Amino acid sequence: MEEAIELPAITAGFTTLDGFIARAQTVLQRRKARSGRSLELHTREILIEERFREGVDFQHGPQSEPGKRPDFLFPSQAAYRDPSFPEARLRMLATKTTCRDRWRQVINEADRIPVKHLLTLQEGVSEAQFREMMQANVQLVVPEPLIAKFPAAIRTDIMTLESFLGDLRILHQA
């Protein structure tokens, strides 16, 4: 699909380097957006496969506060907005294919939830960046096979996706 749309413009050529760079950036940005959306949708499917019920055990793309939309709230937007619902039983999960500086976006996504969980497919972060995340109460979550790609000193502080799911199961039973 991408080739069918972009190849004619590319083969037609460019009159300026800036025109070429602008077109390339547009294509790359579209790819990144599709990749991020794909991770979000795959995460939703994993939750469903693990027998978490959408709308009961989790909510995908809810509004936590005006203008703030975490990727996932646990158990729901209604529980999050209910002041009598215990904060200790609330979770949020953001999904980002890579962290880089974008991890900071999750800090303000759900004010009632002190620790923000961030699922990423990035293969490693520096110890300094990881310490920054921990100081900001961002808990990194990665698929277990990626743990080995992180510095040895921080591996035990990274949550696997399976352990995050286990935490959700415990909360669901409470």
Image (cartoon, grey):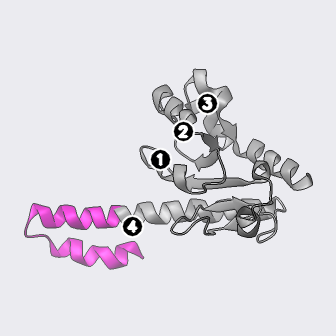
Helix, strand or loop at label 3? It is helix
- Secondary structure under tag 4 reads helix
Badge 4 or badge 2: first in the primary sequence? 4
Q: What stretch is highlighted in magenta?
A: 1-28
Q: Helix or strand or loop: what does disc 1 sit on?
A: helix
Q: In this view, does 130 lie to the left or right of 74?
A: left
The residue at the point 82 percent across, 58 percent down is 50
Instruction: For the residues labelled 3 and 2, say whether their Cβ atoms are less than 8 Å apart.
Output: no
The disc placed on residue 136 is: 2
In the rendered image, the quadrant that contains the N terminus is: bottom left
Disc marking residue 30: 4
Residue at the left extreme of this rendering? 15
Closest to the observer: 10 or 34? 34
Residue type pointed to by label 2: Ala
What separation in Å lies between label 4 and label 2 (alpha carbons)? 29 Å
Q: Marks 4 and 1: in contact by CB < 8 Å?
A: no
Q: Is mark 2 on a helix, strand or loop?
A: loop
Q: Which of marks 1 and 2 is nearer the N terminus?
A: 1
Circle 3: residue type: Ala
Which mark is drawn over residue 148?
3
CA gap, disc 4 and disc 3? 30 Å
Tell us which disc is closer to us: 3 or 2: 2
Labelled pair 4, 3 in contact (Cβ < 8 Å):
no
Please say if the residues under marks 1 and 2 sit with CB atoms less than 8 Å apart.
yes
Queried whether the magenta region covers residue 22, the answer comes back as yes
Residue 32 at x, y percent in the picture: 43, 60
Dot 2, crowdedness within 10 Å: few (<14), some or many (≥20)?
some
Dot placed on the residue nearer the N-terminal end, 3 or 2:
2
- Work out how far the residue at label 3 is from the one at label 2, CA to CA, in angstroms: 23 Å
Q: Mark 1 highlights which residue?
A: 104
